Image: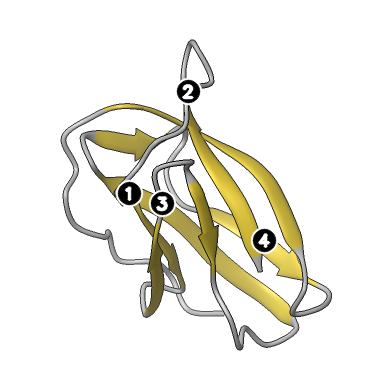
């Protein structure tokens, strides 16, 4: 699974943010805002982005993974102070 974390309002890449799947599998964005997470099973998961002075708009969101090679595209974050993951519900 790949994607790119960008900030509002300028869509600049966010380096050093943590991208979490189900609060357990994580990756850190590179200087270009891009991340790679491997070995995510097909099905529903929770996605969240935090740290690096940003928080995800609307908080954690549910995603549907159809293949390990899924491209999530751009994930938009806004300035915020959340440095650790929230609890996410179980399916």
Q: Residue at x 42, y 43 (%)?
A: 59
| Residue 11 image position (x, y, % from top left) | 53, 20
**Residue tagged by mark 2?**
12
Give the spatial CA distance, label 2 vs label 3: 13 Å
Query: Please, is residue 65 above or below residue 33 in the view?
Result: below
Which quadrant of the figure has residue 19? bottom left
- Residue ID for mark 1: 17
**Which mark sits nearer the N-terminus, 1 or 2?**
2
Residue at image coords 47%, 43%: 33
Task: Please tell me which residue is depicted at 27% across the width and 59% down the height of the picture.
Answer: 86
Mark 3 closeness class: few <14, some 14–19, many ≥20 residues within 10 Å: some
Crowding at mark 4 (Cα within 10 Å: few <14, some 14-19, many 20+): few
Q: Are marks 1 and 2 in contact (CB under 8 Å)?
A: no
Q: Which mark is residue 45?
A: none
Q: Tags 3 and 1 in contact by the CB under 8 Å rule?
A: no
Q: Secondary structure at mark 2?
A: loop
Q: Residue at x 50, y 32 (%)?
A: 6
The mark that comes first in sequence, 4 or 1, is: 1
Alpha carbon distance from label 3 to label 1: 8 Å
Q: CA distance from mark 3 to mark 4?
A: 22 Å
Question: Which residue carries the number 4 mark?
Answer: 63
Which quadrant of the figure has residue 56? top left
Q: In this rendering, which labeled residue sits more in front, label 4 or label 1?
A: 1
- Whether pointer 2 and pointer 3 mark residues with C-beta atoms closer than 8 Å, the reply is no
Neighbour tally class for label 2: few under 14, some 14-19, many 20 plus, Cα within 10 Å: few
Cβ atoms under marks 4 and 1 closer than 8 Å: no
Label drawn at residue 30: 3
Considering the image in quadrants, where does the C terminus appear?
Answer: bottom right
| Outermost residue toward the top in this view | 9
Mark 2 / mark 3, whichever is N-terminal: 2
């Amino acid at each position: 699974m790949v994607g790119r974390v960008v900030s509002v309002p300028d869509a600049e890449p966010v380096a050093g943010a943590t991208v979490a799947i189900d609060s357990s599998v994580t990756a850190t964005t590179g200087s270009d805002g891009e991340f790679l997470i491997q070995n995510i099973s097909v099905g529903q998961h929770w996605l969240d982005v935090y740290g690096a002075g940003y928080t995800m708009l609307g908080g954690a969101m549910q995603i549907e993974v159809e293949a390990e090679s899924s491209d999530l595209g751009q994930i938009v974050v806004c300035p915020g102070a959340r440095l650790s993951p929230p609890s996410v519900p179980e399916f």
